[in-house]
Amino acid sequence: MNDAVIRKGRLEDLGPALSVWRAAETARRGGQPIGAVTERRVRGYTRRPGAFLFVADCGGEIVGMSLATPATSRPRELCVVQMVFVLPERWGGGIGGRLLDATLAEARSRGYGRAQLWTHAADPRAAALYAGRGFVSSGHPESGELGEPIVRYERPLQGP
Ligand SMILES: CC(C)(COP(=O)(O)OP(=O)(O)OC[C@H]1O[C@@H](n2cnc3c(N)ncnc32)[C@H](O)[C@@H]1OP(=O)(O)O)[C@@H](O)C(=O)NCCC(=O)NCCS
């Protein structure tokens, strides 16, 4: 089932996109609800200058989202893919891959030289998604916001 259209997100898509994130993240955590600190962090990404959103739109229903921002340390050179989330009932249908492709193409057209992201070390679907699109893992799990192991992935964007 791959009838969703990937398009740039508009201001009015932000609420539904964050609902997708909440549903996907809650499912990923086995039903554990999202805390206020995480909610604040994610809302902060959406307000950063240069942030850009893509959504997967299925006849008006937002079923997936991705959000990228310039890196605070190297804002001209490095694009950080902060979030890629798909409604749990749509996992494995190719939407995450298409959202990531659109996000990387946009980052490239904005002139970024590299893309980076952090993801949970133990998630095989996320690992397949990123490794399949040229990202290389740092290989060293670090501790995330909630103490869970996370790994950094990075890839160049320009060149052949
Ligand atoms: C990670 C996530 C965004 C992927 O979205 P998706 O629509 O399920 O992704 P796709 O269907 O495009 O599949 C992504 C890759 O995982 C692989 N995959 C699919 N099902 C899998 C499974 N059960 N186990 C391992 N890999 C799997 C696919 O083959 C695909 O790789 P490919 O593009 O090289 O073929 C989605 O599962 C999600 O929202 N997960 C919870 C949140 C999360 O972990 N987000 C990433 C961190 S920010």
Image (tube, grey):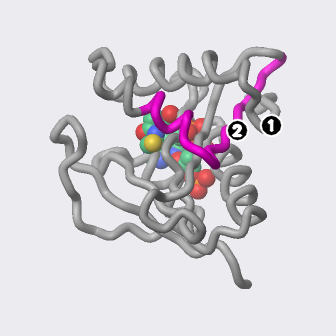
Q: Is residue 51 magenta?
A: yes
Mark 2 touches mark 1? (CB < 8 Å)? yes
Question: In this rendering, is residue 63 above or below 157?
Answer: above
Mark 1 CB near ligand 1 (8 Å cut): no
In the rendered image, residue 111, in percent from the top left (x then y), is placed at 71, 69
The residue lying toward the viewer, choosing from 55 and 129, is 55
Identified at 45% across, 47% down, the residue is 126
Upstream in the sequence, badge 2 or badge 1? 1
**Quarter of the image holding residue 46?**
top right
Q: Which quadrant of the figure contains the C terminus? A: bottom right
Identified at 56% across, 60% down, the residue is 79
What distance separates the C-alpha of mark 2 from that of mark 1? 6 Å
The residue lying toward the viewer, choosing from 120 and 52, is 52
Q: At label 2, which amino acid type do we have?
A: Phe
Question: In this rendering, is residue 72 above or below 40?
Answer: below
In the rendered image, residue 69, in percent from the top left (x then y), is placed at 56, 50
Q: Which quadrant of the figure contains the N terminus? A: top right
Magenta residues? 42-59
Q: At label 1, which amino acid type do we have?
A: Arg
Bin the neighbour count of mark 2 within 10 Å (Cα to Cα): few under 14, some 14-19, many 20 and up: many
Q: Is residue 93 magenta?
A: no
Identified at 39% across, 48% down, the residue is 124
Question: In this rendering, is residue 125 above or below 127?
Answer: above
Q: Which residue is mark 2?
A: 54
Disc marking residue 22: none
In the rendered image, residue 106, in percent from the top left (x then y), is placed at 74, 56
Identified at 64% across, 68% down, the residue is 112
Identify the element where label 1 is drawn.
strand
**Quarter of the image holding residue 109?**
bottom right
Q: Which residue is mark 1?
A: 7
Q: How many marks?
A: 2
